[in-house]
Image: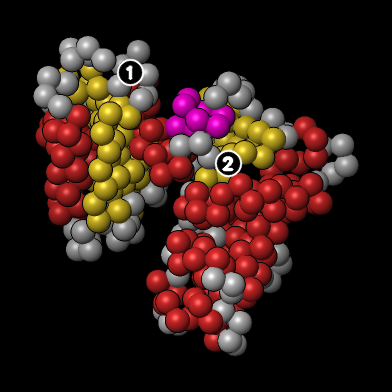
Amino acid sequence: MPKDEKVYVGVDLGATKILAAVYDSKLRPLATGKTKTPREAKASVVVEALAEAVRSVMAEAGSGRELGGVGVAVPGPLDRAKGIVRYTPNMGFDDYPLGDELAGLFGAPAYLDNDVQAGVFGELRAGALRGKKNAVGVFIGTGVGGGIVIGGEIYRGSTGSAGEVGHMIIQEGGASCGCGNYGCLEALASRTAIAKDAAAQAASGKAPALFAAAGADIRKYRSSALYDAIEAGDKGVRKAVDRAAWWLGIGLANLVHVLNPEAIVIGGGVASRFGAKFVDRVEASMKEHVMPGLAGTVEVLLSELGDLAVSTGAACVALEAKR
């Protein structure tokens, strides 16, 4: 690319990691970097770590690149228009003017977006949902998040929080969820749910490889650890992952009934690690539970952008705001 062409930085700001990437105007990544989010729950410390991540990837992208804008994807409620983070657990943000602060630090416009909505936006503009007009994205990680595409654009709802698919209640009296309800999709199909299920399997001797690698500490039951345990022959872990895929398929069936999308993209750490076979199991469950005649109307797709989905969407927010 010409060195005088503007570049855009997208940041995936999570409770455990900060992933920053530099993109050209065609959303092609030029440099990426990842660092741990500071454990100290103080906004100023997190902002400094975020700023350093941006500086680092800009330096890696090379000198002479003019920064056209920064997009930051954040979990939790936002005021997107004002660039304010209303609240984010574990990072100290409380009605925090993150957009203005970053704009001042970098001398370029800064924009905020919800993390999963940004991930779906990335897939819409540069990934598996390219060209789709009506679609849904479901991202499976520590929790379950989502985003809705209507008419080729992200549907945000009246307050910007549309797409909280993880908190559809799909099992009355089911497992407790962090939101305070019971039987939410997140409580049954997230990596956290899989880890709890796998821990029970390990305690009963049905997941010896997982227990040998991570003990009984479910905080160590990351997607990679679960995958490795299955590869080592842990039938109990395979059962836990299959059960989550089955519940996720029920959730997708509900989305098909309500939204009639042409495509659903599955992303997040669990999907990235377990790949197409996991998506196939989800799709099979969806088809089992959807109303006859609708199963063939929707594609179930694996994310094309993987770990870069959220940062790509965040950069695209900044890019499109300038047009």
Chain part drawn in magenta? 121-129
Residue shown at 59% from the left, 87% from the top: 204
Screen quadrant of the N terminus = top left
- Kindly identify the amino acid type of the residue bearing the numbered disc 1: Ser
* Colour setting: secondary structure
Query: Which circle, 2 or 1, is nearer the viewer?
Result: 2
Q: Which residue is mark 2?
A: 302
Tag on residue 25? 1
Residue at the extreme bottom of the image, as rendered: 204
Residue 94 picture location, percent across and down: 27, 52
Quadrant of res 147: top right
Task: Bin the neighbour count of mark 2 within 10 Å (Cα to Cα): few under 14, some 14-19, many 20 and up.
Answer: many
The magenta stretch spans residue 125: yes
Quadrant of res 73: top left
121 vs 170, left or right, is left
Residue shown at 11% from the left, 24% from the top: 63
241 vs 321, left or right, is right
The magenta stretch spans residue 182: no
Screen quadrant of the C terminus = top left
Q: Is residue 231 above or below residue 26?
A: below
User: Circles 2 and 1: CB distance less than 8 Å?
Assistant: no
Determine if residue 311 is in view: yes
Nearest to the observer: residue 295 or residue 74 = 295
